[in-house]
Amino acid sequence: MSELMKQNLIAGQWLDGAEAAENLNPADISDCIGVYARASVEQVNDAAQAARAALPAWSSASPQLRADLLEAVAQALFARKDEIGTLLAREEGKTLAEAIGETARAAQVFRFFAGEALRVGGDAVASVRPNVDVEVQREPVGVVGLITPWNFPIAIPAWKIAPALAYGNTVVFKPADLTPASAHILAEIIHAAGCPAGVFNLVMGRGSVVGDAISTHPEVDAISFTGSVPVGRDLAVTAARGMKKIQLEMGGKNPMVVMDDADLDIAVPTVLNGAFFSTGQRCTASSRIIVDAGIHDAFVERLLRDMGALKVGNPLDSATQIGPVVSEKQLSNNLEYVKLAGAEGAEVIGGERLSHESVGYFQAPAAFLNATNDMQSSRQEIFGPCASIIKVAGFDEALAVANDTEFGLSSGICTSSLKYAREFKRQSEAGMVMVNLPTAGVDYHVPFGGRKGSSHGSREQGRYAAEFYTALKTSYSFAG
Ligand SMILES: NC(=O)C1=CN([C@@H]2O[C@H](COP(=O)(O)OP(=O)(O)OC[C@H]3O[C@@H](n4cnc5c(N)ncnc54)[C@H](OP(=O)(O)O)[C@@H]3O)[C@@H](O)[C@H]2O)C=CC1
Ligand SMILES: O=C(O)CCC(=O)C(=O)O
């Protein structure tokens, strides 16, 4: 194996894998970011055993120790955010500003859970029986398997790893095979901060091998997954068979309603951001823009003007607003949807593959005009810079179309009416609702998650993360 190969972290040791893979920059595939080990099934087993062995000491350690570790990780991430952000932009393709912002967000998440480690509480409850005391306490779930996607390669790992460790669990972590560099640097930081051997284990590699081995391993008590719907559904079945706790964050087909009383100076940038920034590669992206008839033509005119002015290019160039699509496979998926939208009768503006001097996976943002909500391009998650523009007549139809989807992650409305905003917040069948704000781009300290086909299990992030990363114990004692 190459000396430059980045290794897995198992039981406190950096180890080569069964094979290795090159990590290529999607903006310029001649730029190889590094070679990353792919763990074998046996190594996943070693990692799970190490996590099990480390559990008793870690789960009973002083919360101060856990808080100090998480705070040290936060500080290192803050101190190195420009360097890590640059690496993240190179491997995933989001702009440098977004990538540095994502790294800072990961740091904030670690800092938040450093505080939460000191706030693990419970309830003292009056018993219905005389001289009996009842206590309800939170305990760690045990060994948790964390499986993450490529689109937020440091923030999503952070918002799973930080609460897992804060509440006293031990971790087997598998990042996406496409983006191991950000995950690896995070693992280096956690290790260098003094995390005890076996408490945190990094096993890189493919989902079909490493992810499958984690989700079926008998020593893994719980699985937290973010990614696609098909993989998430399979994992739910696997988890049920193994009686494991599971939490799934999956796709979205998030609606953004633009009412006829919306301020276009707010609505147009809000839609551009939600639909196209981060190349549309956010599960919270706005992919259905539901526009009231009274404002439709004026909105579309401004949207197309500003969409055409968006600068697609190398993420490391400070003028770039939209970087490349993450991979050739994702790009060809997006281009198929652009074709499909046209074939279904939408008027397609943009969406073509762009050639740049460097060889990368660049795509122009796409608007599917005159789309209807029953088109497949309006129903299936694309995960690229593509948005269907659907015309409706009035608030009731807008709300009905917004809710007419199998997903329910985020939703939004642009309006100047308190009545519409209030009603939309109440009636929207989504886990996160935005008023005059993009559907994507959330705070790090409040619950994140959806309803219907988007999510399963309890919420991530904020203090609500305790629901997943702890198990309740009710104890009774008789005082005599
Ligand atoms: N909700 C979200 O945030 C995201 C949604 N998606 C959606 O998913 C589509 C495909 O993206 P993709 O990255 O392939 O998503 P996947 O669901 O395939 O990947 C998410 C994670 O799950 C892993 N995985 C894959 N197969 C298995 C398995 N059988 N058992 C356990 N783990 C597994 C992946 O590994 P590996 O990649 O290493 O093989 C990755 O770490 C996108 O086009 C988009 O629609 C994608 C990313 C994020
Ligand atoms: O919108 C955000 O800030 C987060 C989105 C996200 O977590 C995702 O796309 O997976």
Image (cartoon, helix red, strand yellow):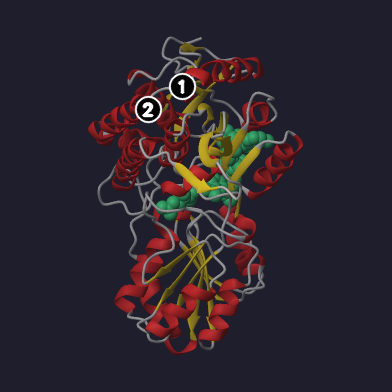
Q: Is residue 155 above or below residue 319?
A: above
Instruction: Report the residue marked by disc 1.
Output: 58
Splitting the image into 4 quarters, where does residue 222 fall? top right
Secondary structure of the residue carrying tag 2 is: helix
Q: Position of residue 237 (x, y in %)?
A: 74, 42
Q: Are marks 2 and 1 in contact (CB under 8 Å)?
A: yes
Q: Is residue 225 above or below residue 269?
A: above
The answer to which of marks 2 and 1 sits earlier in the sequence is 1
Q: Position of residue 195 (x, y in %)?
A: 39, 20
Q: Residue placed farthest to the front in the image?
A: 480
Image quadrant containing the C terminus: top right
Q: Of residues 65 and 420, which is closer to you in this image?
A: 65
Mark drawn on residue 66 = 2
Residue type of the residue flagged with mark 1: Trp
Residue at figure coordinates x 53%, y 41% from the top left: 133
Spatial distance from mark 2 to mark 1, Cα to Cα? 8 Å
Q: Of residues 221 and 76, which is closer to you in this image?
A: 221
